[in-house]
């Protein structure tokens, strides 16, 4: 009887194990079937993706590295000044990037760096047609360019109408990496709202970061979601070698279509302008400005004659929201301001002297070219302070050059001052949110500081203002 029960139990276990194995085998195809299938999307929209080549009639200067493959020229163009290419005895088309057809009227969108400086732009379609394109307009700040070809009944893409793209969502790119036309790569959205400042330290595009393989030649091509909608325009890669390293960036389609609308209308793009120099708020600065956590954009300088100056923004203000849009990182502010129409009123939530206030002002128009910041101060002898600083009064000619009314200059920094990041040559204009016009002002304010507490110090380094957090020693 016992043996019969044992045999029965073993039989049940065997049947159960077999059932588990069978379930796993049945589940495997089901899991594979759950992976996205891009074939229909590619068949439908790949014909709307184009390869873009350019011709430059002016011989290029020598100076940049010589590539084995001419398709690598696009990569070198992103990191070397225009025109610094190989000398050529006659103009010839260079395959530089990709683009896609927006509508049946023949408008094509691509990156500005793909066509910048071109004397002739050649667009090649999947059916092997080649058409000369007219440059309608370009916007270097967003790295977008709008082209037009004389053709009809062109295949077009479908654009996403909302910004509800989610991190982790599948996306697909079609383009011409290294000149291999209509190559398809897929991946997921890694992050959104990435700021990639330009050489002028501007960041007006909240980039989509993906792990889709994007290489030289993909620039200007579309980034699709699983619904077959274009959600971004592939623009940049992060790489030390020139090849894909797992991080690529695309311009959101909502930003692109705002640019396209302005380029169609006037051939140029205008953006809102506030007129402040800002920096990130770290934990020490958050404490010194009375914030419950690090967030917002800290104003380190208000430009003379700017909308910010006219509206009452002050150095040391922390802007925490713009038109009721919360500012978590300082880089969020340029994105919001740039998309605001010049002349319109904006509402800013500001923390000033540990109090929350609301400021309303009119947004200006961003100038076509940026300002360069340069300059350097000399140092000399002076008095020392309990904060580890050796200081001197700023000479009148240096103060005039910097556009300030007095201040003290750092001759040497040690102890907590050095730990806070202060350097010789820095000019201190505010300590603990109070004006510093000379050594007497600094000494008076320093004597009143509470031990063990972080205080904000506004310094001018070169000609650029920056806040530093200094923790007063016990």
Image (spheres, rainbow, N blue to C red):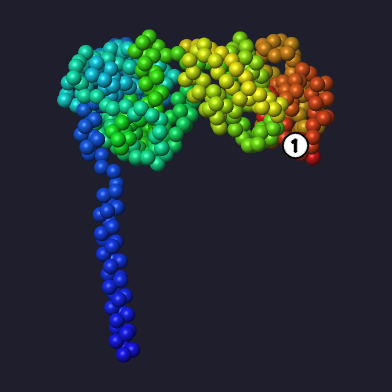
Asked where in the image residue 284 lies, by quadrant, the reply is: top right
Q: Is residue 323 left or right of residue 105?
A: right
Which residue is at 32% across, 22% downward?
110
Quadrant position of the C terminus in the picture? top right
Q: Is residue 123 left or right of residue 61?
A: left
In depth, the one of 42 and 112 nearer the eye is 42
Look at the picture and state if 75 lies above or below 133: below
Task: Let me know if residue 79 appears in the view.
Answer: yes
Q: Secondary structure at mark 1?
A: loop
Q: Position of residue 1 (x, y in %)?
A: 31, 90
Look at the picture and state if 397 lies above or below 226: above
Q: Which residue does the numbered mark 1 point to in the structure image?
A: 453
Q: Position of residue 204 (x, y in %)?
A: 47, 23
Q: Position of residue 98 (x, y in %)?
A: 29, 25
Q: Position of residue 118 (x, y in %)?
A: 32, 14
Structural crowding at the residue carrying mark 1, measured as other residues with C-alpha within 10 Å and reported as few (<14), some (14–19) or many (≥20): some
Asked where in the image residue 379 lies, by quadrant, the reply is: top right
Instruction: Give the residue furthest to the bottom.
Output: 1
Which residue is at 30% across, 76% downward?
12
Task: Let me know if residue 71 appears in the view.
Answer: no
In depth, the one of 251 and 425 nearer the eye is 251
Which residue is at 29% across, 46% downward?
35
């Amino acid at each position: 009887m016992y043996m019969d029960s044992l045999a029965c139990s073993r039989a049940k276990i065997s049947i159960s194990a077999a059932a588990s194995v069978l379930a796993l085998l049945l589940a495997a195809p089901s899991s594979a079937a759950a992976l996205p299938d891009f074939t229909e999307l590619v068949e439908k929209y790949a014909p709307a993706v184009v390869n873009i080549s350019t011709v430059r009639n002016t011989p290029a200067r020598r100076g940049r590295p010589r590539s084995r493959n001419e398709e690598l020229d696009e990569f070198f163009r992103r990191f070397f000044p225009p025109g610094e290419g190989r000398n050529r005895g006659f103009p010839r088309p260079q395959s530089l990037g990709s683009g896609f057809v927006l509508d049946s009227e023949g408008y094509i969108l691509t990156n500005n760096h793909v066509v910048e400086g071109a004397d002739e732009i050649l667009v090649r379609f999947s059916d092997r047609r080649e058409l000369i394109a007219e440059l309608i307009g370009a916007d270097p700040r967003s790295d977008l360019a709008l082209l037009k070809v004389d053709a009809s009944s062109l295949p077009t893409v479908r654009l996403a109408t909302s910004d509800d793209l989610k991190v982790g969502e599948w996306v697909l790119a079609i383009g011409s990496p290294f000149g291999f036309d209509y190559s398809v790569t897929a991946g997921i959205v890694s992050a959104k709202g990435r700021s990639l400042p330009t050489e002028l330290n501007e960041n007006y595009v909240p980039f989509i970061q993906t792990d889709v393989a994007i290489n030289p030649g993909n620039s200007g091509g579309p980034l699709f979601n699983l619904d077959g909608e274009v959600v971004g325009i592939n623009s940049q890669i992060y790489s030390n070698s020139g090849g894909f390293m797992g991080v690529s960036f695309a311009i959101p389609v909502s930003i692109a279509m705002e640019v396209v609308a302005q380029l169609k209308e006037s051939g140029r793009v205008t953006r809102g302008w506030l007129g402040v120099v800002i920096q990130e708020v770290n934990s020490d600065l958050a404490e010194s400005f009375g914030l419950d956590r690090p967030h917002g954009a800290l104003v380190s300088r208000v430009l003379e004659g700017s909308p910010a100056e006219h509206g009452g923004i002050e150095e040391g203000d922390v802007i925490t929201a713009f038109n009721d849009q919360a500012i978590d990182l300082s880089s969020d502010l340029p994105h919001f301001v740039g998309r605001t129409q010049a002349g319109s009123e904006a509402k800013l939530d500001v923390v000033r002297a540990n109090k929350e206030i609301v400021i309303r002002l009119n947004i200006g128009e961003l100038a076509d070219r940026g300002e360069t910041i340069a300059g350097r101060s000399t140092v000399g002898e002076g008095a020392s302070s309990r904060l580890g600083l050796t200081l001197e009064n700023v000479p009148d000619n240096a103060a005039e050059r910097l556009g300030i009314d007095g201040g003290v200059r750092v001759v040497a920094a040690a102890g907590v001052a050095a730990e806070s990041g202060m350097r010789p040559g820095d000019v201190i204009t505010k300590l603990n949110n109070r004006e510093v016009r000379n050594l007497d002002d600094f000494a008076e304010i320093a004597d009143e500081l509470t031990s063990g507490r972080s205080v904000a110090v506004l310094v001018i380094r070169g000609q650029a203002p920056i806040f530093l957090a200094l923790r007063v020693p016990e």
